[in-house]
Image (cartoon, helix red, strand yellow):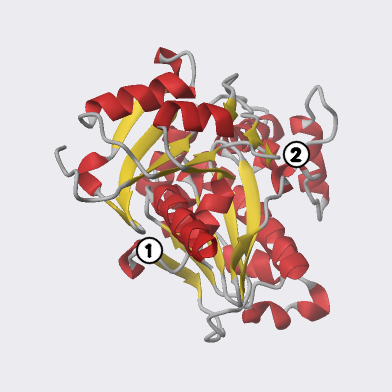
Amino acid sequence: MGHPDIIYSLVADIGGTNTRVALAEGRRIVDSTIRRYRNAEFPGLESVLRRYIDDEGGVDPIAACVAVAGPVRDGRATMTNLNWTIDRDTLIRATRAETVAILNDLQAQGHALGHLDPANIRTILPGPEGNSNAAKLVIGVGTGFNAAPVFDLDYGRIVTPSESGHANLPIRNEMELRLCQFVSTAHGFPAVEDVLSGRGLERVYAFLGQEMNDPRECSAKDIMESCANGTDQRASEAARLFTRILGTVCGNLSLIQLPFGGVYLVGGVARAFAPHLTDFGFGDAFRDKGRFAGFMSNFAVNVIEDDYAALTGSAAHLVSLAADANH
């Protein structure tokens, strides 16, 4: 790289399959430094970060932050689908950075709000202009499901972690009860994530096949493609049912957190569904809260279509940590 005069921080987004790493200058991700590594090819995070530092010519970052798809507690992350040790010591050893941080990937998405290009934010349900410090809510729909509220306080932003995807799936009618019984796993009654995720969409499709005595399977990717080009009626029906349940769950989370600053959907499935949410009845399901239906119009709903938002959020978090340290 050969930029000894510029101070970079290192940021990484560790998913179940790939890890993306980049350098950041303040809150700005340096696009030319974004690299992607396949987790299966590495024994752990340390080897990925060391490889990255070599690939970037031995860069020496001042700070490092990683966003992880899994719960983080006491500076240590447990990944749902990967047996890597991810803790502060590993990060310090791998990067030799003075400041290190570990975030849940949804927390990183929350820290990115306000620092993303507005061109990458698609409005699904408009809402009133919120006070810029109003609470916001990030909801991730992808390989899994999760949500994180975002609070802007006088002394900085707090994004609290949650594991909302593992709460029980809400059901409102006989058909959804049959879906729950169909999806019921070895663990019993399905969690939100068992339906509202990529593999959940595949289960919804399979369920509709059972309902019609015409079972067949379809991958999430093919279901979304069929929705876009209208080739498979069942794919559209599966997407509609998925969208209605998504609207219900997002409405529930909004009543719990009161995000007057807006709801932001993130993740691969959310991005794939973005063009169809309105047609498939997301708004009606979101507002279907009895006498609180009118109140639901307080919450704008948007989809973030920026694949690197978690990297931006990790960089923004490091900037705020540096500001705290200087006070």
Circle 1: residue type: Leu
Q: Using the image, determine if residue 229 lies above or below residue 96.
A: below
Which residue sits at x=62%, y=30%? 206
Residue 154 falls in which quadrant of the image?
bottom right
Amino acid type assigned to the residue bearing label 2 in the image:
Leu
Whether residue 224 is visible: yes
Counting from the top left corner in percent of width and height, residue 266 is at 50, 53
Residue at x-position 41% and y-position 32%:
95
| Between 242 and 305, the one nearer to me in the picture | 305
* 143 vs 231, nearest the viewer: 143
Marks 2 and 1 sit apart, C-alpha to C-alpha, by 37 Å
Q: Quadrant of residue 48?
A: top left
Looking at the image, residue 93 sits to the left or right of residue 145; the answer is left
Quick one: label 1, few (<14), some, or many (20+) residues within 10 Å?
some
User: Mark 2 sits on what residue?
Assistant: 179
Indicate the position of residue 241 as horizontal and vertical percent values. 63, 50
Quadrant holding the C terminus:
bottom right
Q: Nearer the viewer, mark 2 or mark 1?
A: 1
Check disc 1 and report the residue beneath it: 116
What secondary structure is found at the residue carrying circle 1? loop
What is the x, y in percent for residue 261?
58, 76
Q: Residues within 10 Å of mark 2 (few under 14, many from 20)?
A: many
The quarter of the rendered structure image containing the N terminus is: top left
x%, y% of residue 215? Answer: 62, 25
> Which numbered marker is on residue 261?
none
Instruction: Name the residue furthest front.
Output: 326
Specify the quadrant of the image occupied by residue 97.
top left
Give above or below for 99 relative to 313. Answer: above
Q: What element does badge 2 sit on?
A: helix
**Residue drawn at 49 percent across, 61 percent down:** 320
Residue drawn at 44 percent across, 69 percent down:
114
In this rendered view, identify the residue nearer to me: 104 or 203.
Answer: 104
